[in-house]
Image (spheres, rainbow, N blue to C red):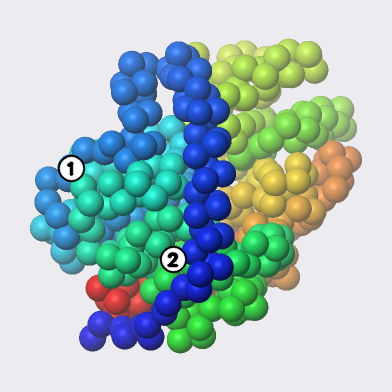
Amino acid sequence: MKEVISPYSPSFVDEMCRWLYSFVLVLLIPIAFFALIRRGALRNQNHNKRRFERFGRVAHPQKYNGYLFHCVSVGEVVAASCVIKRIMESEPDTQITITTTTPTGSARVRSIFGDKVHHFYLPFDLPMAMAGMIKRIKPKAVMITEVELWPNLIHTCWKKAIPVVVVNARMTDRSAKSYRKISRLFRPMLHKVTHVCAQGERDYKNYLSLGIDEKKLTLTNNIKFDQVGATATARSSFMGLNYGEQNVFVAGSTHDIEEEAVVLAAQGIREKGSQLITVIVPRHPERFEAVAKLLKKMGEDFVRTSESTSLTDGAKTILLDEMGKLNQAYQVANYAFVGGSLADKGGHNALEPAAWSAPMLMGPNTYNNPVICDFLSERGALTIVSSWQEMRDRILLWIEAPESAIRAGGAGRQVLDENQGAVNLTLEQIAKVV
């Protein structure tokens, strides 16, 4: 049965705040457009043509009355893919449209779904651009993955009585604090959103504190528990490496300062007489060259996956400079570091190495997924480190006592298995409003 939402009428002040926000965006659009042109000069001609999608000039889908999923980038695309695939199975004739805001997110849509979905970049959040996009797509429901809430997108859907569901919704303490400062702009969105599926207790409580009606909020837990568990099946080799044949340390989704810490830790381990192969996977492709220069500067003998299919003699470090292959690297990991955590980025997905039973290290910045990290820490699967020395010492301990590494890795996989079910709960909520 379709969920009935109580009527809402925005105040004059609320509407003025949204129009002021839109006016500021109009002033910023020329800067954003020239930035797109500049980036397009470095990419292919197809990317140049697609920049007009940012203004609502998007291709019509093959069919109308489908689902529109908005995913910011790679992480959101991967998380939403579980829900999308289930909808495609149950409604094979229904059109699925996916929007992203980054080229890496766009590439991941194509790698997962190919031509089975309609895809384009989400337009700038201007009233006319969003209205034009919705008019062309004619969705029966809009799903926003995790965190990216746009006032004019949500307003356009609300005016046209199109349900908007936030799936795997994330609301950090930092984000909640920021939204409170612009409550006149943010709170009306909570009235216009149809339902929010919170990924954790923190997110659920923060949405409540921001003023959402409790009837429009459900704690579904994190879809990533389901998504990651489904992808981890049989192990395969990576760069000629096989799990258990050597000590492999994979540093995934790293940012600036983290690669240096990983290299220093690995060098310190080798100085102690232990053998270790290190795999470094930068979060953003535009940093591949910078990380390669850093490795040369630090005296590392390394290979790049884009240039080789296996380790060369003497090389102890692999730079994974291709998108979409981090999961392959985790399959051969004896130990893992999850990036964005020594750098102040909030920490990335610790469940990916947990799915392959790899004991994990993270820095102290885990505010993007605190519940998951707390689960993993409490069970002994995740160790928090604050420096490369602590990273070195923990890996040395695991090398010297391999049974402790096996226990930690097994605990991580158990946490993942015990917390699945978010996809089914999310689909239940979507069914209530469509």
Badge 2 crowding class, 10 Å Cα cut-off, few under 14, some 14 to 19, many 20 or more, is many
Q: Nearer the viewer, residue 2 or 244?
A: 2
* Left or right for 285, reference 87: right
Name the quadrant of the N terminus: bottom left
Instruction: Identify which residue, 105 or 434, lies in the foreground.
Output: 434
Q: Which residue is mark 1?
A: 60
26 shown above or below 77 = above
Q: In the displayed structure, does residue 390 sit left or right of residue 61?
A: right
**Element marked by disc 1:** loop
Numbered tag placed on residue 362 in the rendering: none
Q: Residues within 10 Å of mark 1 (few under 14, many from 20)?
A: few
Dot 2 amino acid type: Val
| Mark 2 element type | strand
Residue in view at x 25 percent, y 73 percent: 434
- Which numbered mark, 1 or 2, is in the foreground of this view? 1
Residue 306 visible: no
Q: Nearer the viewer, residue 265 or 367?
A: 367
Q: Please say if 15 is above or below 276.
A: below
Q: Quadrant of residue 48?
A: top left
Does residue 22 lie above or below 225 as drawn? above
Cα–Cα gap, marks 1 and 2: 24 Å
> Residue 140 appears at what percent x and percent y?
22, 64
Q: Disc 1 marks which amino acid?
A: His
Q: Is residue 40 visible?
A: yes
**Image position of 397 (left or right of 160):** right
Task: Name the residue beneath numbered marker 2.
Answer: 166
Residue at position x 86%, y 27% in the image: 271
Percent x, y for residue 58? 26, 38
